[in-house]
Amino acid sequence: MCGIVGYMGDQQAYPILINGLHRLEYRGYDSAGVALLNGHGLHVHKCQGKVSDLEKHVEGRDLGGTVGMGHTRWATHGPPNDINAHPHVSSSGDIALIHNGIIENYAAIKEELAHRGHLFRSDTDTEVLVQLIDDIRRSEGVDLPEAVRLALNSVVGAYAIVVLDQRDPNLMVAARKSSPLVIGIGEHGDHFIASDATPIVEHTKNVVYLEDGEIAVIERGKGLKIRNIKNQDKTPFIQELEMHLEALEKGGYDHFMLKEIHEQPRSIRDSMRGRLNLVKGEVVLGGIKDHEEKFVKAKRILIVGCGTSWHAGLVGEYLLEDLARISVEVEYASEFRYRDPIVDEDDIVIAISQSGETADTLAAIELAKGRGATIIGICNVVGSSIARVTHAGSYTHAGPEIGVASTKAFTAQVTVLTLMALMIGQKRGTITGSRFFRLLNELDAVPEKVEKVLRNEAQIRYIADIYKDATNALYLGRGFSFPVALEGALKLKEISYVHAEGYPAAEMKHGPIALIDEEMPVFVIATKGGSYEKVVSNIQEVKARKGKVIAICTEGDTVVRDLADHVIEIPDAPDPLVPLLSVIPLQLISYHIAVMRGCNVDQPRNLAKSVTVE
Ligand code: G6P
């Protein structure tokens, strides 16, 4: 959470920073600010609101300067307001700092600094860090990089920071621990800093991912130097970005979320590309090849993740148990990390994360790694922290996902999990040859079927219009469709603020049925196969209580059509592949309801895409 950008070079910094903040706004959007250094010292402009509010706020002000930094905030300590917005400036007025993360021991440091006469203006943990750096610089007579290094040795917590000092206008210092930071190196000696590569890609493809505990010192004319907080020099490892600028634009859609929903035929295909070989009849996941043996022998797999990634993990449980006959436990990373779980060297832990930066998932990985487990990552963001700390993994190739509500990342994660389960199942001999080949062919046909579902959008929008004013909604599914019910409910609540619950259909009678009346829309995934007949009975139970049923059913199903108030048909597919199709109408329903309710679809209130705090 929170997006940070920095720039030093020959160009004017402000337009680069604002553009970068727009790209990073998915990380938090309750306040924003910039700090610029020019011949007349430090200029800080900040305000509550979005980056567009900041742009209005700075109209007519001095925005000159070829060094600067910017921040878009997701509040942790202190409410979103002008004062708590970043950058924060030390009481001397010399040093400015932006921060993504949490300084856990800020209260103790603040108390000590207050005794030493420092005045605090904000409620944030961040202000403590900038005061501490200034205090050390003055009291110990050290330069800025050293003051930052010493200060970071005193703090506990997570941070990605950029620091400027008006006494050193040709110096920019950045550091990270548990929050991401990328440095772009331009052709003409310009340097860019950002929380992820999206603000950098239009300027340069050469980047350095800062490691935990590293401090980057960028000096005009001298370039980038890296040391760690123990004061050891490090050689910057320059990598080439594979990201393309078009992937970061809306491409004619009204919202990123809608664009990303429509990209799914491509993103699912890309996540299979080079892995599913119909001619040879095999699945090859290059990233985990060295660990195949471990999978074949595994007695148990643990899956950790948060939010939508956790839902993908649940689908993974059904897939791995069905196809590979391995017992799977799916854990919320936040619970797993704090309950002394039983994990050992025989275990495989699959960590799923779109961003690759989720703090709880990272902590869960560290815990399991510490106990000797083999950690396999399924991440979307190349070079992200999770992708780097895992032993091996398979990237999803969904491309950048900007809408805060995850859509194409989910289907890409499920695609990779399906490939994994097929590959392991084949190696373990737990799936018959004919089923394996049928599923390979069916999986290959999924992108086309998704296209077909997307062509139903007008009908889905019509249904959205009928239920847009609902205050509650229930989502039901069984087997492979149960996690999809959870995901459908999550999509609705996060972007349209309608209270929604996902349930295994049979559990309805243990509570949720009490809520059903003529006002309650009930979305039921009732595709052929699996527990179809049982779900049809559940639909009847809802109808008997006058609930409104919107069923996702298999093409041509007249039984469900006769029972339900509305049906959205999806092409026939084997049970394990149904989630890749049935989730699409639920994503579209939520999107259209949110738009009709006037909600900010891409930036829902209180949420952020990359949750780098626990
Ligand atoms: C946030 C996002 C969700 C996402 C979850 C996990 O809550 O809004 O869309 O599913 O974090 O994020 P990850 O990047 O680890 O998949």
Image (cartoon, rainbow, N blue to C red):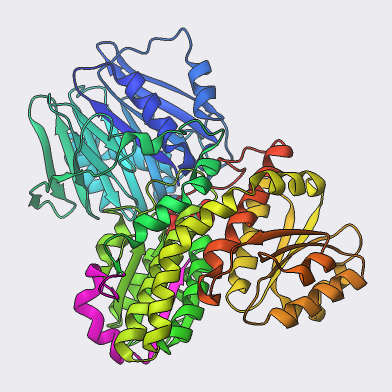
Residue situated in front as seen by the camera: 311 or 149: 311
Q: Position of residue 549 (x, y in %)?
A: 81, 63
Q: Where 46 falls versus 397 (above or below)?
A: above
- What are the residue bounds of the magenta stretch? 278-305
Residue situated in front as seen by the camera: 420 or 64: 420
Q: Is residue 216 left or right of residue 453?
A: left
Q: Determine if the magenta segment contains residue 282.
A: yes
Q: Position of residue 76 (x, y in %)?
A: 52, 48
Q: Is residue 462 left or right of residue 513?
A: left
Q: Position of residue 423 (x, y in %)?
A: 32, 79
| Number of numbered callouts drawn | 0
Q: Where 56 falls versus 459 (above or below)?
A: above
Q: Is residue 116 visible?
A: no
* Quadrant hosting residue 518: bottom right
Q: Where 14 falls versus 422 (above or below)?
A: above
Q: Is residue 158 visible?
A: yes
